[in-house]
Amino acid sequence: MTPIDSDEVLAGRARFGQAIRDLGHSFAGHHSDPALLNEAAQTLEDLIARFDVGEIRRRDPSTFGDHRRYNYEQGPVGETYPDRPVSGNASPWGLDTEIHREGDDIVAYVTLRAAHEGAPGRSHGGVVSALFDDIFGFVQGVVGITAFTGQLTITYRAGTPLHTRLACRVRAGEQNGRKVIMTGELTVVETGQLVAEAHSVFITVDREVLVNSMRDTQSDT
């Protein structure tokens, strides 16, 4: 059985996840001399060795897909899964999103930073794609479904700027059987410029069947 993290552990993981993200952007965004690079690498390698002796950590299947229980109210959306790769506050790969429900839309406010750079001064397109995919997941809490991404199409309208506050706004549309269409836009908050649009097809699943299958998979490993 997956242990339940205490509030102290959750707070520590959130702080450490933030530090890892900030370190990545500081490293990517600044020149460093070889001495500092090698000293930092040794420090991190020592930390890795200490973390690796800990008990294997896996996500509890019972926490997956039960978006209906969140019942998102209007305004800020609280944490759903701290290790969620894009929006989790403990994720080393997080984008430090601020997520809100506005009407039936989910809006994620985000400022992409140095480690997200692809073309000079612009975000890598894969980061934008991952942002949309993750935030579409929160729409499930609005419409009361459990689903997986079946198809995701991104149309890039302009370069996505770094160090600029952005708004990723998404919502659910037509539902046809198990298919749920979701659409969204990424804009620059200050100017309203449209930089990307997204169209996705999500496939609904029976949550209990899904969770039980995940438990069976974990028990086999």
Image: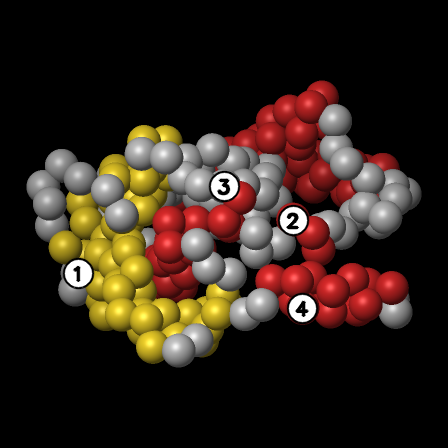
Q: Name the residue located 44 percent from the left edge and 41 percent from the top edge.
A: 71
Q: Name the residue located 67 percent from the left edge and 29 percent from the top edge.
A: 10
First of labels 1, 2 by sequence position: 2
Q: CA distance from mark 2 to mark 4?
A: 14 Å
Camera-side residue of 204 and 94 = 204
Mark closer to the observer (1, 3): 3
Q: CA distance from mark 1 to mark 2?
A: 37 Å
Q: Which residue is mark 2?
A: 63
Q: On residue 158, which mark appears?
A: 1
Mark 1 near mark 2, Cβ–Cβ under 8 Å? no
Mark closer to the observer (1, 2): 2
Camera-side residue of 20 and 155 = 155
Mark 4 near mark 1, Cβ–Cβ under 8 Å? no
Q: Which residue is mark 3?
A: 70
Mark 2 near mark 4, Cβ–Cβ under 8 Å? no
Counting from the top left corner in percent of width and height, residue 84 is at 56, 48
> Considering the image in quadrants, where does the C terminus appear?
bottom right
Label 2 sits on a secondary structure element that is helix
Mark closer to the observer (2, 4): 4
First of labels 2, 3 by sequence position: 2
Residue type beneath disc 3:
Tyr
Q: Which residue is mark 4?
A: 209
Q: CA distance from mark 4 to mark 3?
A: 20 Å
The answer to whether 74 appears left or right of 92 in the picture is left
First of labels 2, 4 by sequence position: 2
Q: CA distance from mark 4 to mark 1?
A: 42 Å
Q: CA distance from mark 1 to mark 3?
A: 34 Å
Label 4 sits on a secondary structure element that is helix
